[in-house]
Amino acid sequence: MQARKFQTLQESQGFTLIEVLVAMLIIAIGILGIAALQYKGLQYNQDAYFRTQVNFLAYDIADRMRLNKANAASYASNLSNYTVPATRPGGCTQTGSSAIGASNDLACWKQELYDALPPGSIADISSSGGQYTISISWTDREGNTHDIKYTFEP
């Protein structure tokens, strides 16, 4: 009878190596799941950032066109399928008489496009029947192209 009690005590002491490995496997799967969620969250955050920047950029050039309503057509004729370069464009003047006009507004807007969007993004301003359409497209990290279009009257 004493031998039986001794075996029962030995069987119930501590963890076996299998139990420890199973616990480590469960923890590892949980950590991988958290890492995947973090990665997806970063991707969605970057996409939301670009969408916000596109909204800001479209409203900015639309406001510039509204302020210069008499020359609104020159914005569309001077910007067609503009590709954001890898180096910052120049030509933007912030003060003085040369800071007024469609060409300076477009030069400043090109710099804003460069600052906000990845290289290779495309911006276009077109007109049709008194309405103007601002189109901006960019490619995200996964290679998906996103197109946003805003139509308005100045």
Image (tube, rainbow, N blue to C red):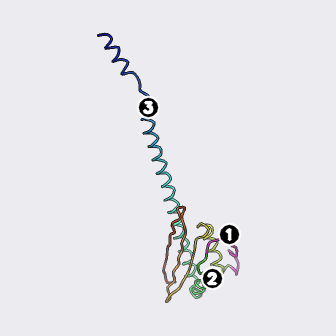
Residue pushed farthest left?
Answer: 1
Q: Residue 2, located in which quarter of the rendered image?
A: top left
Look at the picture and state if 151 lies above or below 22.
Answer: below
Q: Work out whether residue 76 or residue 6 is closer to the camera in this orientation and state it.
A: 6
User: Earlier along the polypeptide chain: callout 2 or callout 3?
Assistant: 3
Marks 2 and 3 sit apart, C-alpha to C-alpha, by: 70 Å
Asked which secondary structure carries label 1, the reply is loop
Asked which secondary structure carries label 3, the reply is helix
Q: Which mark is residue 56?
A: none
Give the side of residue 9 with respect to residue 71, left or right. left
For disc 2, the neighbor class at 10 Å (few under 14, some 14 to 19, many from 20) is many
Q: Is residue 91 magenta?
A: yes
Give the side of residue 102 with respect to residue 141, left or right. right
Q: Where residue 127 sits: x, y (%)?
A: 53, 85
Q: Is residue 12 magenta?
A: no
Q: Where residue 145 sits: x, y (%)?
A: 51, 69
Marks 3 and 1 sit apart, C-alpha to C-alpha, by: 56 Å
Asked which secondary structure carries label 2, the reply is helix
Q: Amino acid at mark 3?
A: Val
Locate the N terminus by quadrant.
Answer: top left
User: Earlier along the polypeptide chain: callout 3 or callout 1?
Assistant: 3
Look at the picture and state if 46 lies above or below 23.
Answer: below
Q: Where residue 66 sits: x, y (%)?
A: 55, 82
Give the side of residue 95 with respect to residue 72, left or right. right
Residue ID at (47%, 43%): 31
User: What residue does disc 2 label?
Assistant: 102
What predominant SS class does the magenta segment belong to?
A: loop
Q: Amino acid at mark 2?
A: Ala
User: What residue does disc 3 label?
Assistant: 20
User: What residue does disc 1 label?
Assistant: 88
Q: Nearer the viewer, mark 1 or mark 2?
A: 1
